[in-house]
Image (cartoon, rainbow, N blue to C red):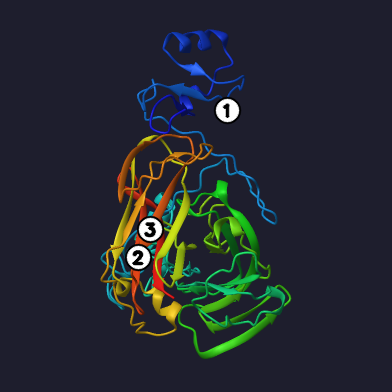
Amino acid sequence: MEPNKPPFLCECPCHSDLSDPGRREMLKKLGWVTLGSMVAPHVLVAHTSSTCNCGKPVKCPPPNVVTQPGTVVIPENIPPLKVNTTNIPPWKGGNKPPIGDPGQIPWFKGQIQNILKNGPSFGPRKDEFLPYLLIRAAAGDRGNRPVDPFWESPDIFVVPNQDAASAPPLPSTFGGIAQAGAPNTLYAHVWNFGKAPVHRARIEFYWFNPSLGITQADANLIGAAWVDLSNRFTLYPTWVPISESYGQWMTQGCHAIVRCPTTWVPTFENNGHECLVVRAFEPILDAVSPSQFSASTDRHVGQRNIAVVQAASPATIDLNLNLGYPVSPANAEVEVAMDAPSAMDWLKLYSGSRNPGFRPPTSSVTAGFSTPILRSQPPPPPVFKPHVKFHQHCEPLKVAFHANAPDLNPGDAQVLRLRHLNAGKVVGGYTVVLLKK
């Protein structure tokens, strides 16, 4: 099956009952083809167009997901309760009479009647007495989503050549690069911007093969830790060590740095360029779905997709990048943008300076993608373009990326931001930095 041509696999709800032979015969007359001997509700159907016969867009079958060690996936068949929310907190809304006004009691009774009739109303999430956990996508991030770029989190740290068992509670470097085939220790900087403290928030550390699109199907759990956080009004002047029976961390009140208790050893296959994802949540008061790995849409998820290439000259990189699983077939594209080093805040962590002093190279830099292909196919001939449009169907794809900076001078840095767009929306990203060694 070619990546940009039908048939399109589909798991539309209208296919939910194919056990009836008469219905199967009718579907064949309509031009639907069942694949294999699977029966409802897991029958896959192939269409020759991206629209199902029911008139709806083709819904791709979900990818196979392997349950991660140490996690439990609880089926949620009942949709969550819908709550009434308002942009104005209930205690400030309406025509509330001033204190001492004779109309206060009738107004209050009216509020009670509204609650009995329509249920309680809640104000903005940040104003409720709840925790508000966050892993930042950039400096100054307060949790608003979506955000772009979302894959350069300043809150995920790597200390290379360091075993987790002997690692210090604070990372020795905030801009470390993973070392392939060697022990690496991971840290996460987690925040609570809620009005309520949080007890035993779970922090999960994952690695992924280099990807332009992160999904649960490709996740590899490294380890998990737990942390307590004060509310957003609490801020200590210095880092304070905390040691509990369920974990150790360094805190400044509403934010803390947590060490992953498991050592991570990246493979030589990817030269240590794997993607890192950290999820922070509290299962009751600030939960996140087990399948949620989108850092662009969820503040609980932080993502670090950064490859730094240090070379004397030339600086060259070749990456095989997985593309994410689409919800339905759609027009897609991959593109690379060349940005100035001043546009990437993460370089401040890498250099350990608020003014890294990197400058764009004066020589030309070439970068581009090959044609996306199925993950099972061999790589195509090396023809690279900075912008490639294609039609993405339900099968998982991969794309090759190549970049070359032939004449870098000391202090030169070229930032390459790679984006994967599906139906016009950015669904995946990766950043490559080419530096003079």
Label 3 neighbour load within 10 Å: few <14, some 14-19, many 20+: many
Give the quarter of the figure containing the C terminus: bottom left
Q: Amino acid at mark 2?
A: Pro
**Residue 176 in view (yes/no):** yes
Residue matched to label 1: 42
Q: Amino acid at mark 1?
A: His
Q: Secondary structure at mark 1?
A: loop
Q: Secondary structure at mark 3?
A: strand
Verify CB contact (< 8 Å) between mark 2 and mark 1: no
Front-lying residue, 191 or 213: 213
Q: Measuring from the top left, give residue 206's x and y in whole percent.
A: 58, 60
Residue matched to label 3: 403
Residue at (51% x, 33% y) in the render = 61
Residue matched to label 2: 406
User: CA separation, marks 2 and 1?
Assistant: 52 Å
Using the image, determine if residue 165 lies above or below residue 86.
below
Q: Measuring from the top left, give residue 142's x and y in whole percent.
A: 39, 70
